[in-house]
Each structure stands twice: as C-alpha cells, then as structure tokens.
Image (cartoon, rainbow, N blue to C red):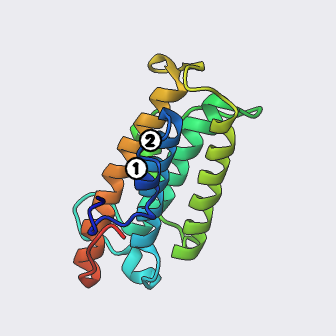
Amino acid sequence: MANPTIDPTLGPVLARTGDERAILDAFLDFHRATVLRKARGLPDADARRRLVPSLTTLAGLLKHLALVEGNWFARLFAPEPGDIYLTSQEEADASFTLGPADTVEALAAAYEAACDRSRTIAARFDLDHVVPHPQLGEVSMRWVLVHLIEETARHAGHADILRELTDGETGAI
C-alpha cells in the first residue's frame, strides 16, 4: 500500500519503477521546478535581496542555473560557433550578478527556456555518450545528468532557505 503522505503525482514518484533515464530526468525536472516555485510570486525587490554574505539571491539563483544549463548541455553536447565553456570563478560570480532588466519573471522565463533546450539536447544522446570537457577530460551524458541533479538540488536548498528568510514560506512543493 502506498504511503498517503507522498504525493503520487510527483515526477520522481511516477518514475520510481522507470528506467535509469526516466528516473534521472524526473529528479532533475523536480529540482528545476522547485527552484522556480521558490522564486515565483515574490516581488522583484525581495527576490533580489541579499540575505547571506555571498552573491546568492533567489533571482540570482535563476540566472546562475540558466547559465549552468547552457554550460553543461548546449556548450558541451550541441555547441554553436563561438560557444566557449565557462570555467572561471569570475564567470561563476557574474552569473549571480543582476542587472536592471533581471526581473523574477524574465529570469524564470530564461531559466525555463534553458531547461527546455537542455531537455531537447539531452534527449538526442544516450546516457553513455561521451564528449570532451575542458577541465575533466571527458564526461558522459549520465555524469552530466547526475551532476545537474546535484547542483540544482543544492541550489533548490539554498532557494528554500532564502524564501523562508524572505517571507517564511517553506516546503519543496
């Protein structure tokens, strides 16, 4: 009998007996959606507010994760002319820096578009497909998916804490 406290419609729950790809995709999409839920519904000023010593803000997380999606999927698996894989700390810091046009809705839309592009690119490759990586030598699609689950989940945790500090809202869903 299923545990009645677990939402049976959550992607990771639906994929619980799926193949490896279905499970990896479900967990990554769950964490992507969690980050979006944490940022949406806040006034821009609240989403931009720095509540911790680092550059991390709810709005900044959306901007950073959009860059992360592009870096790991588009730039590695479907690079376009002139694409350069970003590796420096300065580039990472810049990905959290907000400009005047960086509203929650604009950033959320950009993140969703980056995630959609990542899904499209990832679907073209099997999990064992390997590509060159400028720092690691080579990475497989499987490794990239697991890495993105880890990074997105970590930032979803940051978003959860920032949202709680902002207006008291808690919970992943």
How would you rate the neighbour count of disc 1 (Cα within 10 Å): few for under 14, some for 14-19, many for 20 or more?
many
Which quarter of the image is occupied by the N terminus? bottom left
Q: In this view, does 69 lie to the left or right of 31?
A: right
Q: Can residue 2 be seen in this view?
A: yes
Which residue is painted at 62% across and 44% down in the image?
118
Q: How many marks?
A: 2
Which residue is painted at 42% across and 35% down in the image?
146
Q: Is residue 171 above or below residue 124?
A: below
How would you rate the neighbour count of disc 2 (Cα within 10 Å): few for under 14, some for 14-19, many for 20 or more?
many
Location of mark 1 (residue): 152
Displayed quadrant of residue 147: top left
Label 1 residue SS? helix
Label 2 residue SS? helix
Callouts 2 and 1 close, C-beta under 8 Å? yes
Q: Distance between the residues labelled 2 and 1?
A: 6 Å
Which quarter of the image is occupied by the C terminus? bottom left
Which residue is painted at 36% across and 67% down in the image?
7
Q: Where is residue 41 in the image (x, y as percent from the top left)?
A: 45, 83
Location of mark 2 (residue): 148
Q: Position of residue 82 (x, y in %)?
A: 73, 33
Q: Position of residue 33 (x, y in %)?
A: 47, 62
Name the amino acid, label 1: Thr
Q: Position of residue 45 (x, y in %)?
A: 41, 82
Give the camera-side residue of 65 and 54: 65
The extreme front residue here reads 1
Name the amino acid, label 2: Leu
Displayed quadrant of residue 101: bottom right
